[in-house]
Each structure stands twice: as structure tokens, then as C-alpha cells.
């Protein structure tokens, strides 16, 4: 007897078990099995991986599913049935059944599929949850028999079995089951219902089910070990032998012998493009490319003609003509539908074919981009053209593709959210019955490190170690969390992936569809590619939405269409945006770190911008200082060999790009660019044997080209060191185009740019505040939302940005849409009362109207906000009493309750609550000079662990006593950019307690530190001033600009730049140079004194370094 398990679930039966597929197959092999099934609940998510792993471990894979089907007798309920595929035709049937099961369709479709030849499927009753078993449990032999015969008829003789199980719940019905088998002539087969691998896994699986059901586990009554584990082959055979069910156990092997399945992998399933009559894909693609080349390049030279011919030859030989036509067609639709594309993404930007077909928008010859990085004959792989679109238009692209190729031929791709370290701990703590704060304590004990595992966290965190060792329950909690860590929690849609097929997808891959117009594959991206399906990435990029909106707004404002693809790529005002690191809102250049690199480098071309984009990443960052020094002439440029100059001079001798690795290998070792790409990939994979083999190949080639062995070794060492860090040049240049285009709009059309930018962020986020601060600094006006002129989004009105009604907090989208629709249909609202009368009565509630009042949306009606607030209740009552009777309303119509406007601080608070930011300003605005000369910083500009001063209004004071009885306080301090928590310890509280009052405007000095709580900060106060007193004190002092000279920046050429900056900012503040080496200071003559401003300080920091310029 050789037992085969035919009912086994994995972690892809979501939140039912912790069993990973590889663990399952490995365990089955270790425990002596020659074959095993995978039968997840209603889905086939893991079958490709299961099939491959079984082949790897030399175990026969049996592909199956536990499918919920309507009862044959109890039609109002569903019951599981175990279905196993005999061969690939049977598996196609399982895919179709799973696809239908995972849609919102009538159950009759399932039976329709089953009735249509199910001879390639074996069906087995599942045990305790089955319909037949439920009848047997109720001693209803008649209905059990009727159901059995009905299923036998559907699947055919020899394809339907009664499963007999030895679990405690099933033992009482075994005699009745055997009797049923005799009565119906339906054979039995042994089943075990494997839900986890070891008895000790039972508890963690119970916790998973509690997480799914949002229940708590009773630690007193729960059993840790269970019986639904995977026993050894010998153990299960012994159990069935002792139960006198040897024949049933032997049937499992007979069933396995009937099954012979091969999943076809690595097929060529590329779809065909629907061509015009009388042509071929190759000829049609060539014609489009030749036409496109002459549209792109007026008089293309031989280099373009030769490159195009070469690329088309490679594309055709690799069988990808249809693929390029499909992508071309998508982009042609985007142009027709006025959907702005990105310049390109990834290595596809290195293809001239992509460029002339307007799939990408970067000339690969002009920018020295390599086709072989994208596609080459030496390395066969599917082409991967990722397409970027505005995120608010991506669905339009998906719908076009679906309509073009048919809904059964297009699907999005599944991905799985898993239980990460913190989530697994939080979820386990919740089902253990811990409070929110107790669960948070566990979460806070995990270090804030991306991708950290619980095992790593336990090693690094003393706090976590202490929690675990506190008691047995905590130890069990941690162990359970560790077991469920990494388990799939839910299925979701891949952000970009779309699959297209000539044949109906349900014949190739299982699908699902819930609340969506497009199917979702049950296989993940990797499995899709292994099968051989064409995967395309359509990405929604928020920054393209911003760019498109900015171009549309600017075009409307200047009444002239702006073509963003025809802007000059050497525009000085645009480059100045990068040189000054004025890059808020500029794609990939917003972080403080990359801004610092921009200031150091001072980009002078799109090449410099692309290099910064490539270098500012883990690994390449170590090259930044060398790159900057060489660009500025502060360090000699070393090319290793003169022949490499033409390749490396664009990056000052620093190997920045993967393409440079390829070009160096081609130049020195005579490699084809395809061979050079294989070398690059070998080094990138960090496999020593492959790296050593490529070294030998490289040195042999270099010797044949006439280079010395020493030079070859030296260059290969350099390649090996930096190839790991090299970045894809095609991608870097293409994405730098988007950044440049955004910077161009910011430089030339700032109002349109910021209106588009504000539309892209949450109206109540820190980003919004940050952008408002910049608007204020640039003197760009922003007006209140207006009930008669505002639409949903921010818009431009005579070069003023007008707040959109959609930005008002607390208002429903459908309410705002009705306001706009009514206004468009019947004209402007004449006054506040008329507005209330014209809006549908369901919206006439305080919570809908007051946010409009607080936001200033009714200010144009000429009444104070306090008046409208006081008048609102009476007006709502009058409308309610009068209904639609105009005469009655004219009698009941109340007068405005004219009221003096509320105090400024209250007005600002209510306005900020409604808009996320007060447009009237903030009390600190009167102290702008203090910010401009660096005497104080905004709370969002505070740096960690550095003594700084900031100013703001005091909110929410909490006074306490320490354990020693000393008084201290916590408070919140707010300015126009945000809010911070401040702490005043006893020694400072005693000195400054009289100043600490609600709504008091104060200047505080201290240090910002990170709180123990994640994402929290705390400002430790050491001095406090009244704001007005501080301004008076600072006005009596003459502030100086200090410039520190170091070994790196004490250069004559930098002094020339310094005097240019000083000459443009003349004023009455002295400039003092401090030489760090000699420890001497020198005050410049009065004609070089300056007016202190943020612009001055940023310019000086760009010359001498951020840390070397200060105001004191």
C-alpha cells in the first residue's frame, strides 16, 4: 500500500493555514510520499509553483481544488467537493470552474460547466462539510443516496468517490458511508483533510481563522495541537489498516495512477495584432517605422537608417513584430484620446523603433541609449515595454485594450498582500484579546526597518525581547506571530500588469472578477511569464497627471496650446530650478537628500540631471562626491585608459550607467553589445562562477584587441566593483525628461504648475502646507473657494489660484457635484438664502453647510461668517416649514442675524479645519523678517539634534508633575507650515511658566528629537521668548553672514562665484569669512555687505556647502 493525500490546502486558502507550498512539498518528500495533491478552497493560486516544486522534489503533482458548489438536494446552500484533474484538459475544466466560482454569476453556470463533459475530472466528497456527509450525520440515507447518484451521473462511472476519513467528527458515519457505497456502487477512497503540516501548527491556523473572522481566541479552551496535520506515510497507512479500510487507502494510489498532468510552461502565447488585409506583421511594422522616422527626424542620416534596420531585424527574428504593433496601437489610441504619455520607462527607451512609433519620446541616438540593453539575440527574453500614463486616465487605456481584444482575452494580474512583521504581531495581539495600546506596544518594539523579519527584530530589539520573556502568554503570542508572518493575507491587483492573449484566458489561466470590469488572473506576475503569456505594464503616474493638468491650465490661461514635447532642453530658467534645488513638486527630485546633491553639483544640462537621478540611490551614492568634485574641476578625471574617454566623459570618468559597462566591454574586449549585456547581468547576479568566467572571457578579448593584461584586469576590477550599482541609463534619461518638463512648467508657468500640484495632494496633508508656504514665498495668490466660481479642483482665475470646492474638508463628493450641477443649470446663486432654497432638502444640514461657511465659500455674498453661522438655524427652519411654497416662505423668511465677526484666532482655526490651511494667514506672518534672516525656522524646517529656534502659537498645554514632584509641561506649537509637540522640563518650566499660555505667540529654542513612537517627533525646549519681545531684541542686533572655509571649498574659483552672489544682494549685514584651518576670521569690506534673504543663503550654500553658511 502506498498512500496518497488527495485533500490538502496551502496558505493560498487565505487565512486558513500557515502551510507554504515549498514547505508542503518538502515535508511530503521527507515523510515518504511519492505523490500529493493541492486542493485549495475555490482557487488555483499556487498550482504553478506547486507543479514546479513537485518536479524539483521528484513527487507526482496532483492538481485539484475544493470547490464550493450548490447542493444537489439542499439547493439553498453550498458545499465543498474535492475535484482533481486527470490531465491538462481536466485542469482546464478546473480553471473554468474556479473562474466562474470567483465571479458574481448565478450558480447555474457552474452546473452548466460540469454537465459539459467532466470526464477528465475526479470528484471526491470532502468530509465533515460535504452535503452527502451532512445527510449521513442526520441519518438521512435516502437523500445521501440521491445526492451520490446525482454526482455520479455528472462525473461518470469511476470518476466519483465517497471520501472516508478517520478524523473524530467523521468516525460515527463511516458505517453509513460504507453502506452507501454498497447501495450505489460508488467506491470509497481514503481521505485525511490535511490543513497544516505538524500537530503544533493547529493553534497558529486557529489564530489565522480568528483574524479573518475578527474574533478572539479563548486561550483557556484552545488546544495547541491538532489532528489535521500531514502524518508520515507509514503512520497514515497504519491508521487505515487498523480501521480495516485498507482497500480505501489503496484506492488513493489507484486514483494517482489515473492522473498524468503536465502544465505547459514557457509557451509562445504572444497575441497577434489585427492587421489590415494583404500585409504581414513584419511589413506593417516596417512601414510604420519608416513613416515615423521621417516624422521624428526631418532628414535622418545613415546612423538612423542603419539602427532602424538592425532593430527591426532583431525584433522580427525574435518573433516580436506583433508585440510592437500592439504597443504602438495602445499609444496611438492615447494620442487620439489626448492622454499624455510619459517619455519612456526602463530599457525600452533605448529602442529607436519605440521612438519612431511614438511609444517613447527620447531619441536613443542623440542620447546614446543602447537597444541591446532592451533586446538582443544573445539573451532571449520577452520584451518589456512599460507605459506610463496620468493616473486619472489609466482606466481609459485598460478599457480600450479590453474593447479592442475582448474581455475574455484581457486581464489584470494578481498580487498578494502578506502579513509583515508588525501586522502579524498586531493581528495576533488583537485575537489574543489585547487592548489597542497593548498591541501598539508590541508593534512599537519592532525597529523601523524596511522588510525586517520578526526573527531579525528579536535580535535587535531589547524591548521586544523583554515583552516576549514577560510571561508564557507573551511567548506564545510571539511564536504564533512568527508562524503566521509572511502568509498571504489578501489578493489584490498588481499596480501595472495587464495580460493579453489570442485565446480565451480561462483556457490558459484561472481568473476571478469581483466588483470590476476586468478579469484578474489568479496567477501572479512570475507565473504569468512562466506560462508564456504576454504581460504589459500600464502604470498610472501621478506626476504625469500633474504635468498634464499644468499644461492644460497654462494653455487655457495664455490662450495658446503648449506642446511640452517641443520645449528647449537647455532652458536656463528650468536648469536654475535644479541648480537652486527649488524642486518641490518635481518628479523624483523632492527629497532633502537629492536637493543637497543638486546644490552641490549645480546641473547645467539634462545629462547632469539624469546622472543625479541615477546616482542618488543606495550603492551609487558613494560615487556622488567624486562625481561632483570632478565636474567642478576639484579632482582629476581618470578614464583608466584613453580609449574609454568617449564612453565615460559624459559622467566625468565615473561609471554611472549599466550601458557604460556594456560599452566598455564592447570597446576593450570586442564583445557584441548583446554579449556585453550578458556580462553585465552576470555581475549583477553576484554569482562568483559566472563573474570569474566573464573575467576570463573579458581578458582574453582585451588581449586580442591589443590591450595589456594589467590594463584588462584593472578595467574588469572597476567594472566588477561598480556594475552592481550601475543604473539603467535609458530609464534615468527618460524619467529625467518628466522631471525637466515639470521644472519647465514651474519656471515658466508657476501658477498653473502649483494649481495642478495642489490638485494632486491631500488637502489636509503636510505636503499641502509645504506647497502653501512656497506659494507665499513666491507671492502667488490663492483665493478662497467661492460657491459661484469654484469647481471641484483648484483652478486658475486671472493668474490667481482658486481653491476648489473638493478641497473643503467634511463635504461629500455628491453634495459638491450637486452644487456645481445646479449652478451650471440655473446660474449663479444670488445670495445665501437662495443657495439654501435651491439645494435639495436632503443636504440642508448643519454639517454640510458650516464647512462651506468656515471655508469662506460664501464670503462674496457680503456677510460675515459669524453672521451666516448665527443665521443658519433659522433659515433652515423656515425652509423646512414652508416646503416649496414661495408665498409661505416669503412670510416665514427670517432676517440675517447680523453679528460681529468672530475673533481672528477662532476664525483662523475654523478656516484651517475646513481647508487644511488658513488662507487669511497665521499670526506668525507679521514676523516674516525673522524667517527671512534665519532668526527662526518653520517647524517643518527643524533639523534633528541641532539647537534651533522656531515660532508659533501654543495649543493644548498639559501640565504634570514628575515622580519627584517637580512641575513640567507638554504643549503643541503650530505655525503656518504645521505643528510640533514641545516638552518643557522642570528646570526650564520654572523659568518660563508665565509665558506658557494657550494662543500665546512664542519663540522657543531647543532641539528636535525622534520620539519612541514611530513617526513622532518632540522638541525639547531650553529657552522661551515672547514673539514681539524677541523681534525687538533681534532688531537691536546686527546679524552677520558667516562663511566657513575648509580644505575642500577654499578655492579661488569659488570666491569669484561668492562675489557674484554678494553683488546681487547688497545690504547692511556684514559678511565674515572663517578659515577652519588657520582659525582666523576676516570681515569683508562694506561694499560686499548684504541684505539677508533665503535666496542669498541658498545661493551661498550652493557654492560653499549647506553646513558652511550661517547667520548669527
Image (tube, rainbow, N blue to C red):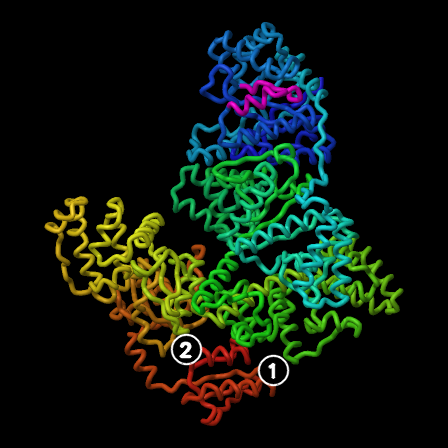
Instruction: From the viewer's side, name the closer residue of 93 and 259.
Output: 93
Image x and y of residue 293, in percent: 69, 61
Image x and y of residue 348, in percent: 67, 56
Above or below 67: residue 926: below
Above or below 651: residue 94: above
Q: Quadrant of the N terminus?
A: top right
Instruction: From the viewer's side, name the closer residue of 327 and 558.
Output: 558
Above or below 319: residue 213: above
Q: Quadrant of residue 162?
A: top right
Q: Is residue 959 left or right of residue 281?
A: left
Q: Is residue 112 magenta?
A: yes
Image x and y of residue 220, in percent: 43, 30
Q: Are marks 2 and 1 in contact (CB under 8 Å)?
A: no
> Which contiguous range is marked in magenta?
108-127
Instruction: From the viewer's side, name the closer residue of 1055 and 793.
Output: 793
Q: Secondary structure at mark 1?
A: loop
Q: Is residue 671 left or right of residue 997?
A: right
Q: Is residue 933 magenta?
A: no
Q: Which residue is mark 2?
A: 934
First along the sequence among labels 2 and 1: 2
Q: Secondary structure at mark 2?
A: loop
Above or below 427: residue 548: below
Q: Which mark is residue 948?
A: none
Instruction: From the viewer's side, name the closer residue of 270 and 1022.
Output: 270
Q: Is residue 958 visible?
A: no
Q: CA distance from mark 2 to mark 1?
A: 26 Å
Q: Residue at x 24, y 50 (%)?
A: 838
Rate crowding at label 1 as few (under 14), some (14 to 19) or many (20 or more) other CA atoms within 10 Å: few
Q: Residue at x 46, y 43 (%)?
A: 426
Q: Which residue is mark 1?
A: 1047
Amino acid at each position: 500500500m502506498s498512500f496518497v493525500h488527495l485533500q490538502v490546502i496551502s496558505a493560498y486558502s487565505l487565512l486558513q493555514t500557515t502551510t507554504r507550498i515549498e514547505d508542503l512539498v518538502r515535508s511530503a518528500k521527507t515523510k515518504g510520499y511519492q505523490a500529493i495533491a493541492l486542493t485549495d478552497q475555490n482557487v488555483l493560486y499556487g498550482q504553478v509553483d506547486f507543479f514546479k516544486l513537485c518536479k524539483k522534489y521528484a513527487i507526482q503533482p496532483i492538481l485539484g481544488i475544493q470547490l464550493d458548489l450548490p447542493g444537489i438536494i439542499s439547493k439553498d446552500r453550498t458545499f465543498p467537493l474535492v475535484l482533481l484533474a486527470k490531465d491538462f484538459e481536466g485542469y482546464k475544466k478546473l480553471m473554468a470552474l474556479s473562474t466562474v466560482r470567483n465571479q458574481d454569476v448565478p450558480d447555474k453556470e457552474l452546473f452548466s460547466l460540469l454537465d459539459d463533459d467532466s470526464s477528465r475530472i475526479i470528484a471526491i466528497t470532502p468530509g465533515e462539510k460535504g452535503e452527502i456527509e451532512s445527510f449521513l450525520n442526520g441519518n438521512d440515507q435516502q437523500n445521501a443516496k440521491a445526492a451520490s447518484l446525482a454526482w455520479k451521473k455528472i462525473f461518470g462511472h469511476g470518476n466519483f468517490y465517497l471520501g472516508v476519513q478517520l478524523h473524530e467528527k467523521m468516525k460515527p458515519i463511516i458505517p453509513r458511508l460504507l453502506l452507501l457505497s454498497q447501495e450505489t456502487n460508488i467506491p470509497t477512497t481514503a481521505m485525511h483533510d490535511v490543513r497544516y503540516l505538524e500537530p503544533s501548527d493547529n493553534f497558529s491556523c486557529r489564530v489565522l481563522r480568528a483574524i479573518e473572522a475578527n474574533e478572539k481566541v479563548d486561550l483557556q479552551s484552545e488546544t495547541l495541537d491538532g489532528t489535521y496535520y500531514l502524518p508520515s506515510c507509514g503512520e497514515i497507512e497504519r491508521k487505515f489498516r487498523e480501521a480495516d479500510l485498507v482497500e480505501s487507502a489503496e484506492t488513493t494510489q489507484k486514483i494517482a495512477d489515473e492522473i498524468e498532468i503536465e502544465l505547459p510552461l514557457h509557451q509562445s502565447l504572444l497575441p497577434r495584432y489585427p492587421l489590415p488585409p494583404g500585409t504581414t506583421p513584419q511589413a506593417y511594422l516596417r512601414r510604420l517605422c519608416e513613416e515615423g522616422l521621417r516624422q521624428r527626424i526631418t532628414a535622418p542620416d545613415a546612423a538612423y537608417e542603419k539602427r532602424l534596420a538592425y532593430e527591426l531585424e532583431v525584433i522580427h527574428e525574435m518573433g516580436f513584430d506583433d508585440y510592437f504593433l500592439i504597443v504602438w496601437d495602445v499609444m496611438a489610441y492615447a494620442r487620439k484620446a489626448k492622454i499624455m504619455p510619459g517619455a519612456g520607462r526602463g530599457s525600452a527607451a533605448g529602442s529607436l523603433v519605440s521612438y519612431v512609433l511614438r511609444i517613447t519620446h527620447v531619441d536613443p541616438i542623440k542620447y546614446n541609449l543602447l537597444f541591446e540593453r532592451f533586446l538582443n539575440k544573445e539573451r532571449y527574453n520577452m520584451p518589456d515595454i512599460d507605459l506610463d500614463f496620468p493616473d486619472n486616465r489609466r482606466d481609459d487605456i485598460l478599457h480600450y485594450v479590453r474593447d479592442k481584444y475582448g474581455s475574455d482575452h484581457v486581464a489584470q494580474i494578481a498580487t498578494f498582500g502578506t502579513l509583515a512583521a508588525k501586522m502579524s504581531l498586531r493581528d495576533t495581539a488583537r485575537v489574543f484579546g489585547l487592548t489597542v495600546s497593548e498591541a501598539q506596544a508590541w508593534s512599537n518594539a519592532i525597529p523601523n526597518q524596511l522588510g525586517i523579519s520578526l526573527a531579525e527584530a528579536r535580535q535587535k530589539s531589547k524591548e521586544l525581547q523583554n515583552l516576549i520573556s514577560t510571561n508564557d502568554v507573551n511567548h506564545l503570542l510571539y511564536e504564533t506571530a512568527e508562524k503566521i508572518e509572511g502568509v498571504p493575507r489578501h489578493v489584490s491587483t498588481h499596480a501595472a500588469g495587464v495580460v493579453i492573449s489570442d485565446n480565451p484566458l480561462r483556457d490558459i489561466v484561472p481568473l476571478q472578477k469581483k466588483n470590476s470590469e476586468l478579469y484578474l488572473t489568479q496567477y501572479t506576475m512570475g507565473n504569468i511569464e512562466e506560462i508564456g503569456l504576454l504581460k504589459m505594464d500600464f502604470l498610472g503616474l501621478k506626476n504625469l497627471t500633474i504635468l498634464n493638468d499644468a499644461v492644460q491650465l497654462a494653455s487655457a490661461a495664455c490662450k495658446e496650446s503648449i506642446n511640452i514635447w517641443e520645449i528647449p532642453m537647455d532652458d536656463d530658467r528650468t536648469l536654475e530650478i535644479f541648480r537652486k534645488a527649488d524642486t518641490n513638486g518635481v518628479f523624483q527630485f523632492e527629497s532633502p537628500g537629492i536637493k543637497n546633491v543638486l546644490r552641490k553639483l549645480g546641473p547645467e544640462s539634462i545629462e547632469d540631471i539624469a546622472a543625479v537621478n541615477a546616482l542618488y540611490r543606495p550603492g551609487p551614492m558613494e560615487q556622488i562626491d567624486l562625481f561632483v568634485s570632478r565636474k567642478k574641476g576639484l579632482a582629476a578625471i581618470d578614464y583608466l585608459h584613453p580609449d574609454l574617454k568617449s564612453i565615460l566623459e559624459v559622467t566625468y570618468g565615473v561609471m554611472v550607467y549599466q550601458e557604460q559597462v556594456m560599452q566598455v566591454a564592447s570597446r576593450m574586449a570586442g564583445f557584441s553589445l548583446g554579449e556585453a549585456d550578458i556580462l553585465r547581468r552576470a555581475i549583477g547576479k553576484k554569482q562568483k562562477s559566472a563573474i570569474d568566467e566573464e573575467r576570463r572571457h573579458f581578458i582574453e578579448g582585451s588581449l586580442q584587441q591589443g590591450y595589456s593584461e594589467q590594463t584588462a584586469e584593472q578595467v574588469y576590477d572597476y567594472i566588477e566593483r561598480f556594475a552592481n550599482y550601475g543604473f539603467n541609463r535609458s530609464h534615468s534619461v527618460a524619467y529625467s525628461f518628466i522631471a525637466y518638463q515639470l521644472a519647465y512648467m514651474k519656471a515658466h508657468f508657476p501658477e498653473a504648475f502649483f494649481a495642478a500640484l495642489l490638485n494632486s495632494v491631500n488637502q489636509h496633508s503636510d505636503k499641502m502646507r509645504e506647497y502653501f508656504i512656497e506659494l507665499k514665498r513666491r507671492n502667488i495668490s490663492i483665493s478662497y473657494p467661492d460657491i459661484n466660481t469654484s469647481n471641484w479642483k483648484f483652478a486658475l482665475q486671472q493668474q490667481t489660484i482658486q481653491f476648489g470646492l473638493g478641497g473643503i474638508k467634511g463635504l461629500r463628493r455628491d453634495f459638491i457635484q450637486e452644487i456645481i450641477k445646479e449652478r451650471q443649470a440655473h446660474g449663479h446663486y444670488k445670495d445665501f438664502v437662495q443657495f439654501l432654497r435651491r439645494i435639495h432638502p436632503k443636504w440642508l444640514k448643519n454639517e454640510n453647510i458650516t464647512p462651506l461657511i468656515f471655508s469662506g465659500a460664501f464670503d462674496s455674498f457680503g456677510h460675515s461668517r459669524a453672521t451666516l453661522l448665527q443665521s443658519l438655524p433659522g433659515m433652515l427652519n423656515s425652509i423646512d416649514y414652508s416646503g416649496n411654497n414661495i408665498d409661505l416662505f416669503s412670510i416665514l423668511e427670517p432676517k440675517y442675524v447680523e453679528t460681529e465677526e468672530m475673533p481672528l484666532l477662532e476664525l483662523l482655526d475654523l478656516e484651517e479645519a475646513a481647508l487644511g490651511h488658513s488662507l487669511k494667514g497665521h499670526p506668525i506672518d507679521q514676523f516674516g523678517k525673522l524667517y527671512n534672516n534665519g532668526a527662526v525656522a518653520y517647524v517643518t524646517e527643524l533639523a534633528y539634534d541641532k539647537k534651533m529656534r522656531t515660532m508659533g502659537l501654543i495649543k493644548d498645554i498639559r501640565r504634570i508633575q514628575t515622580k519627584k514632584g517637580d512641575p513640567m509641561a507638554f504643549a503643541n506649537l503650530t505655525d503656518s507650515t504645521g505643528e510640533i509637540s514641545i516638552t518643557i522640563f522642570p528646570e526650564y518650566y520654572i523659568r518660563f511658566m508665565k509665558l506658557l499660555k494657550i494662543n500665546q505667540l512664542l519663540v522657543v529654542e531647543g532641539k528636535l528629537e525622534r520620539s519612541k513612537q514611530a513617526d513622532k517627533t518632540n522638541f525639547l525646549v531650553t529657552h522661551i521668548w515672547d514673539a514681539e519681545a524677541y523681534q525687538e531684541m533681534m532688531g537691536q542686533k546686527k546679524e552677520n553672514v558667516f562663511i566657513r572655509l575648509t580644505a575642500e571649498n577654499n578655492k579661488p574659483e569659488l570666491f569669484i562665484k561668492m562675489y557674484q552672489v554678494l553683488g546681487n544682494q547688497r545690504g547692511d549685514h556684514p559678511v565674515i569669512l572663517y578659515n577652519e584651518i588657520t582659525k582666523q576670521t576676516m570681515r569683508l569690506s562694506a561694499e560686499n555687505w548684504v541684505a539677508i534673504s533665503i535666496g542669498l543663503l541658498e545661493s551661498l550654500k550652493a557654492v560653499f556647502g549647506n553646513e558652511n553658511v550661517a547667520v548669527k
